[in-house]
Image (cartoon, rainbow, N blue to C red):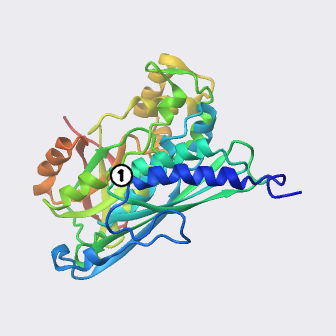
Amino acid sequence: MDYKQAGVDIEEGYRAVGKYREHSAKTMNEAVLNGLGSFAGMYSLKEYFSAAAAMEEPVLVSGTDGVGTKLEIAFKMRKYDTIGIDCVAMCVNDILCHGARPLFFLDYLACGKLDADMAAEIVKGVASGCRETDCVLLGGETAEMPGFYDMGKYDIAGFTVGMVDRKNIIDGSKIRGGDVLIGIASSGTHSNGYSLIRRVLPDLNEDFGGAAMGMVLLEPTRLYVRPVLSLMKKITVHGMAHITGGGFYENIPRMFNGGETSVHLCGVIHEGSWTIPPIFARIASGCYNAGSSGPAAQKFGAELLKTDPVMKKQMFNTFNMGIGFVLAVDKADARQAIEELDSMGFPAWEIGRVENSTEQGALRFECQLT
């Protein structure tokens, strides 16, 4: 028995790497010192230490994440190019919360039996996400593990490193009571809550607004790097949160962690200050009755979100509910922030405020008088 008979096709691996190289090359810049195929990727930091870069004390910021069980929907729909974008977004949006610009990205792809064409589609999405965030796809690893992963199944994880000048790190220490919370639109469910979604929306061929439900659920996570870094050059941002697993309740309070210990902060969300996308009402309906479908289920879910406080809390504690990224800014800068983001194609709203509180990291929802 040889390695191929044991389930590992080295030649297919070579073919996959050849396809990866084509996609990776489109992300390269002058800071990359070698190409794919070496034991490690090399990235020069010379430009960031130069006087022109004006960085007094460069700090590296790193992040890692995966796509989770959203992958299962990609396999069933046989669409593989968007999950690579998800993987990049989950990592770069996280380090962006501290003001870091991503420099490079690495991916880890694992499978039971390698299909070079399928793997290349996944990496194509990774490269697309990297290009959109001015980030280099510096390298990665493809692991073929027969007998460990089911045939046709893949897992993907990503790793990114970014940089920020120490004086510009955003850690929440500037957040004060009276600050405004700006919410930036998500592109849908992003990459969180899919263990629940797969249970309550089992029919991926269900018509949803003229598209198959499975394709709607594969809409890739939005990348906030370019618009937020651009905005940071024009106004002072006090805090940021990427709305991922744990939804509003877990992620918005995370931006307060660097605040003054003597003054506790609370986030107040203004209900109705943005329109919740229809997909979340459909999920809520499925949570109540997994056998529901169609427009009636959609309408019922929307009503649940208005009238059932337990369901509403569950949804806001699991999903982004149409807000993928949140900024805390001075009230005087709120209008400019919204206008700048809107002009870059990222709809934004004033969704709440920060208050001094007796409890650090609290979050509550409040009806706004009209």
Q: Is residue 135 left or right of residue 290?
A: left
- Quadrant the C terminus occupies: top left
- 330 left or right, relative to 257: left
Judged left or right of residue 63, residue 133 is left
Q: Quadrant of residue 252?
A: bottom left
On screen, residue 366 above or below 328: above
Residue at image position (32%, 51%) is: 224
For the N terminus, which image quadrant? bottom right
The 10 Å Cα crowd at callout 1, few under 14, some 14 to 19, many 20 or more, is some
Helix or strand or loop: what does disc 1 sit on?
helix
Q: Which quadrant would residue 145 be assigned to in this image? A: bottom right
Q: Residue at x 75, y 46 (%)?
A: 150
| Quarter of the image where one finds residue 166 | bottom left
x and y, in percent, of residue 151 in the image: 74, 43
Viewer-closest of 265 and 103: 103
Can you identify the residue that label 1 sits on? 131
The amino acid on which the numbered mark 1 sits, given as a three-letter code, is Arg
**Is 246 positioned to the left or the right of 16 in the image?**
left
**54 or 241: nearer the viewer:** 54
Residue at 80% x, 58% y: name it: 3
Q: Is residue 260 above or below residue 100?
A: below
Residue 244 seen from this side: no
